[in-house]
Image: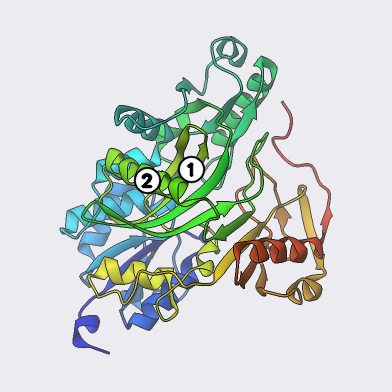
Amino acid sequence: MTSERIAKRLLLLMTTRTYRATAFLEAAGRLGVPVTVGSDVPQILEAANPAGHLTLRFDDRERAVASIAAFAHPFSAIVATDDDGLLLAAEAAAALGLPHNPVTAVARARDKSATRQALKNAGLRTPRFVRLPVDGDPEALARDVFYPCVVKPLALSASRGVIRANDEAEFAQAFRRVKRILAATDRSHAPPEALRWILVEEYVDGREVALEGLLDGGMLRVLALYDKPDPLAGPYFEESIYVTPSRADAGVKKSIEDAARRGAAALGLTRGPVHIELRFDERGPWILEMAPRTIGGLCARTLRFGAGEALEDVVLRHALGLPVASYEREQAASGVMMIPIPRGGILRGVRGAREARAVAWIEDLMITVPTGERVVPLPEGDRYLGFIFARAETPAIVETALREAHARLDFAIEQVDTPGEGG
């Protein structure tokens, strides 16, 4: 452990909803960097280890920034593990004079309407869109939008509240459903302004991919490009399988990477991880979403760099100004299935886990919802039943293994009324 590492302290911002805590904490441990966890709830051991914990109000960033600035142990970097902490991380880093994305750029990226406008202004291919007041009359609004369209919140993630509508009746139903989702959303999980509007955008068909990158001085380094082989045509957009490397041809990959670079510049993002969702058709790539964070859930476990470093190792080294041994992803193909919730209710048990783990090329299966907990499918829900991981010689083998393992699972879900369904 070098004195350079000991001298640095990292502030990790995370809420209790995160999947990412363990991965980032383990990466910091491998680096030998002292960590303070900034969380939205007090930690049990906070009194015994005051340097390691800081309770913050994520929905009151002014007060939270003041608490971070007044903390007894100075920080060398601030990293948010998820969307919830991105704005706070940027504002706190700015206040402390630490390297950071511009606060305005992060705010733009967190607002899907503002993202759309920035991409359009930069001349990037973007679907038609309109921002509508959440208290508007759905039937009246339905007469003035375009079809098919996608109705979505401005700031929620994991496809929560994203609904396709093909005609006026479907639009009115979708609009009311998104309105209910926003009414039930905790203010700490979305900026207040984002809860007052609903975005409607033209539905874009095509193959979908996800790009994982790292920005340094505004330059984008592409770390991985994932295929999403399942069709995502609606009415809801539940993501399931991610496989890397992408099987797109070299020309398509170049156009996707070029669009990603231009998109990051259009939003004004300059530093740190970036996760970008795109579709491409015969006209080229369309940026759907762009977030200044790493890939969500446990999906980062699919990535290994150099001699086996995790994505979190690379991100934290970059944030702390430490050397990164390699940005090159391993040669093997890898993938993950985010296990979808088939119906709402109480999870009573899981059968077939042993058989799923026995499928060739499957590395791991993790059920992340405890037995006895309520599960809610999209568009109201924002979690998965678990994750299946595979690694093999080719993307095709990885995809087949994930599908076979999933087919061996059976989830016992006791049906109860699921809030928000229907019109």
Question: What residue appears at the point 53 percent right and 51 percent down from the top-left corner?
Answer: 248
Q: Quadrant of the C terminus?
A: top right
Front residue of 245/301: it is 245
In this image, 209 relative to 377: left or right?
left
In the picture, the quarter occupied by the N terminus is bottom left
User: Going from the N terminus, do you reach mark 2 or mark 1 first?
Assistant: 2
Among all residues in the image, which is located at the extreme left?
97
Instruction: Check the image and report above or below for 263 versus 214.
Output: above
Element at label 2: helix
Q: Nearer the viewer, residue 150 or 225?
A: 225
Q: Residue at x 71, y 66 (%)?
A: 401
Is residue 107 at least partly visible in the picture? yes
The disc label shown at residue 260, or none? 2
Q: Position of residue 284 (x, y in %)?
A: 46, 36
Image label count = 2
* Residue 177 visible, this orientation: no
Left or right of 92? Residue 301 is right
Residue 278, label in figure: 1
Q: Residues within 10 Å of mark 1 (few under 14, many from 20)?
A: some
Residue 313 locus on image (x, y percent): 38, 73
Whether pointer 2 and pointer 1 mark residues with C-beta atoms closer than 8 Å, the reply is yes
- Corner quadrant of residue 397: bottom right
Picture layout, residue 91 above or below residue 117: below
Q: Position of residue 3 (x, y in %)?
A: 19, 87
Q: CA distance from mark 2 to mark 1?
A: 9 Å
Secondary structure state at the residue bearing disc 1: strand
Amino acid type at circle 2 is: Ala
- Quarter of the rendering containing residue 78: bottom left
Residue at the (72%, 54%) spot, across then down: 374
